[in-house]
Amino acid sequence: MPKLIIDDIPLEVPDGTTVLEAARSVDIPIPHFCWHPALGRAGACRVCAVKMLDGPVKGLQMSCMLPAQEGMVVSTTDPEAMAMRKGVIEWLMINHPHDCPVCDEGGECQLQDFTIAGGHGLRRYDGRKRTYNNQYLGEFIEHEMNRCIQCYRCARFYQEYAGGTDFGVMGRAAMVYFGRQQDGPLESPFSGNLVDICPTGVFTDKTARFRARYWDYDMAPSVCPHCSLGCNITPAARYRELLKVIARRNDKVNGWFICDRGRFSNQAVNAPERPRQALLDGKPATRDEALETLVGRLTEFLELHGPESLAIVGSPRMSLEGNIMAGRLRELIGAGALCYFNAEDDAERTMQAVSMLNGDNAASQHDVREADLAVILDCDLLAEAPMMALAVRQAWRNGARVYVVGRGNTMPFEFVTVASLADVPLTDAKRPVFISGIRHKGIASQSGAKLAFILDGPNAFGCALLARDQGAVPLSTAIAGGKVRGIVSFEADIPAEMAQGIRILAAADWRATETMQRAEIVLPATAWVEQEGTFVNHEGRAQRFRQVMQPGLPIKGLDPAGHPPRVHRKTPPGGDLLPSWLIAAELLERLSGEQAVEPLSGEWERLRGLDAEGEGFLFFINKQINSSEVQ
Ligand code: FES
């Protein structure tokens, strides 16, 4: 633990900390381009110069390359250091096109920030600039090599961190080129991180190109809904259109990155076919009329068939709040079945995860990155939870052994395939993790091993918690019982063949699903970016997502008419939507005549103060609460 002084601030830092990291720990900013917290140092850009005034090292030094040592006295504001940094910026800008007004990175560009902060405002160089041809890198990422400052972050991330092989750095004389051998879509499922990691505008998000500046966006901390890992994201929207998704740092979960599915698979939010109008037997109605009719039909249905013939169906893709309210609705009606999962398999596996995990044995992505042995059971990680594959790769890069039980698909790390768990030598592992795939059954708790279950849906764990407490059953089981004649569903995808001959009395959802098409009463709901809510991820970590944007038809107009109707009204066109939990609450109120209680009450109340920008809250079934996790 060396002690040193930086800009007159004495501090003590862990061994191995660099001077740049030490300065950041006390909020002293040092310009940097090639250094990145997740990638470490490269010493490529030379912009992090500081002056060592005293101690074991003297003179101008690159702070990202220099480990903090006992007795160092560092100045970040010494005139010599500042002149060096200014000079570096000036030479980096010699070839940069200065095209900030037409560059999508403008306003969120590290090069722009440090150039302005360093005081470089006038170009003295009037020679020709080095120029390159750009490449087509697929439909998601735009390439503009002229902006490159050769920090090597892209190649280091793509090849070293993510294991990609189709992109890298090539050089000839004074020309260095970051790209592919030839034009073509980037193959890595993590390629979108180039957009976040490039400190200037070489790689920008093509899907949001020329649509907004950083300050135009509606943004809020959110959680990815595309698998059970709960990676942290910042969706960015403008004019009621979700334009792009940026990775958000959470060291316990995704670290700094996200996968391409999480980044580029969100067009359903803007889809013109998205349900925005309540329907009564296929005809437009107000939400009020739809709910009133539903109350009448439900009463009639219950009188005719009895409560046991009704199933209330929630889903692992709906927020915890929505599923809690679905449970309350069932309680009020006394419905015969409450279902959160369609298939028995799914329900069983998720319940198993919930019953086995506790505060000590649940493996976060961070635990996987730190593991010295990873065992993957019956799982195609890249398909089921790509970021978990990236986490395993980091463990493997640090020397961990990786075993795949069963059939192994191509992965961004080397592994040994074994026939069964018994073939994995566990004895000398200090930090083993077991990662069980969606299809795997029957993993036993291994002594000392942490467990990660890849579940099906962003809130599958939350649903399993509720299912256990409320005696929910899989929908297939409820239907097989032969009593179910009617269903009220919330954000559920009910296979038509499963519910043959059963009335879908009403469905609430933000997606145009088959269930919504079959429903007698359609209740359109807000998407996750249009509401606040909670997902519980695969390890039992409750995470809050905030409302990013107002619901409504995007102004750009994805509908064939080209623009939402130009009329004066209180809500934007297509924006008269409620979150599913509020739809359920309205139904509860109309059925009971009493005001519905807010979803996060009773044992869920402790989740109310959950900080969306914190690390989340480990909410295990055995209620072992680690108070340090409460944000
Ligand atoms: Fe230190 Fe680039 S940040 S050399």
Image: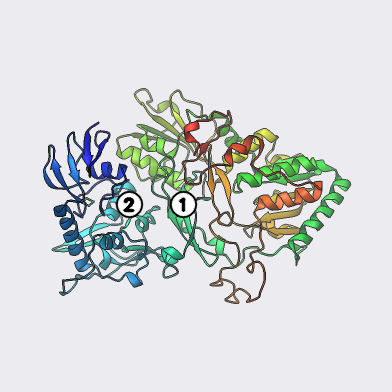
Say the numbered circle drawn on residue 233: 1
| Residue at image location 26% in from the left, 68% down from the top | 146
Q: In the rendered image of this protein, does residue 145 appear above or below residue 314?
A: below
Across and down, in percent, residue 121 comes to 24, 68
Residue beneath disc 2: 164
Cα distance in 3D space between marks 2 and 1 = 22 Å
Across and down, in percent, residue 629 comes to 48, 35
Left or right of 155 in this view: 339: right
How has the structure been colored for display? rainbow
Left or right of 442 in this view: 78: left
Across and down, in percent, residue 90 comes to 19, 64
Local crowd size for mark 1, using a 10 Å CA cut-off: few (<14), some (14–19), many (≥20): many
Question: Which residue of the protein is positioned furthest toward the front in this rendering?
Answer: 8
Left or right of 319 in this view: 134: left
Question: What amino acid type is highlighted by mark number 1?
Answer: Ile
- Answer yes or no: disc 2 within 8 Å of ligand 1: no
Question: What amino acid type is highlighted by mark number 2?
Answer: Gly
| In front of the other: 333 or 222 | 222
Q: Quadrant of residue 572?
A: bottom right
Local crowd size for mark 2, using a 10 Å CA cut-off: few (<14), some (14–19), many (≥20): many
| Residue at image location 45% in from the left, 69% down from the top | 211
| Residue at image location 24% in from the left, 57% down from the top | 169
The mark tally for this picture is 2
Q: In the rendered image of this protein, does residue 553 appear above or below residue 314?
A: below
